[in-house]
Image: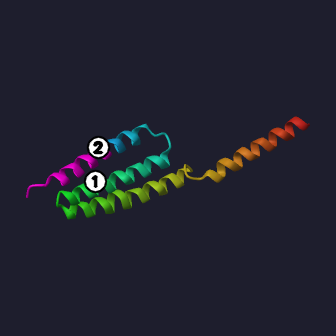
Amino acid sequence: MKMVDGQMILVWILLGFLITCAIAATVTKNLLVTVLIFMSYSVVMSVIWIVLESPDLAGTEAAVGAGVTSILFFIVLKKVGALDTSKKKKHKDDSKESDKNARSE
């Protein structure tokens, strides 16, 4: 089945977004932002599979790419401490307090 012009324009826009997501994921230094970009990449890829009339691949991409893999990334980030900002804030507060105590003595 031949795609109409509107569908072709949509596919080209989505492919441009995929390239932008791929570049952004490699340039970004924040791991949480990288995982979110990866999720959006998977969702857009799922939409492209739907436009190309392949719903089985679209469902798999949405479930595995945006779902399961992203959850696993979030769990790993939590385990390695990349998502825990309270530790960083507490550590900074403790170091400031110890500096004040050292100066006052």
Mark 2 = which residue?
Answer: 16
**Disc nearest the viewer among 2 and 1:** 2
Q: Residue at x 27, y 47 (%)?
A: 13
Q: Residue at x 35, y 42 (%)?
A: 20
Q: Main secondary structure of the magenta part?
A: helix
Residue at far right of view: 105
Left or right side of 35 for 42: left
Residue type (three-letter) at the residue carrying disc 2: Gly
Is 70 in front, or is 54?
Answer: 54
What range is drawn magenta here? 1-18
Could you tell me which secondary element the residue under label 2 belongs to?
helix
Residue at far left of view: 1
Residue type (three-letter) at the residue carrying disc 1: Met
Query: Can you give x and y, in whole percent of width and height, for residue 67 in the image?
Result: 37, 61
Left or right side of 91 for 66: left
Query: Can you give x and y, in whole percent of width and height, for residue 65 in the image?
Result: 33, 56
Mark 1 = which residue?
Answer: 45
Q: Is residue 104 above or below residue 85?
A: above
The quarter of the rendered structure image containing the C terminus is top right
Left or right side of 89 for 75: left
Query: Can you give x and y, in whole percent of width and height, for residue 98 in the image?
Result: 81, 42
Quarter-wise, where is residue 100 in the image? top right
Q: Residue at x 22, y 60 (%)?
A: 50
Q: Is residue 46 above or below residue 104?
A: below
Is 78 in front, or is 51?
Answer: 51
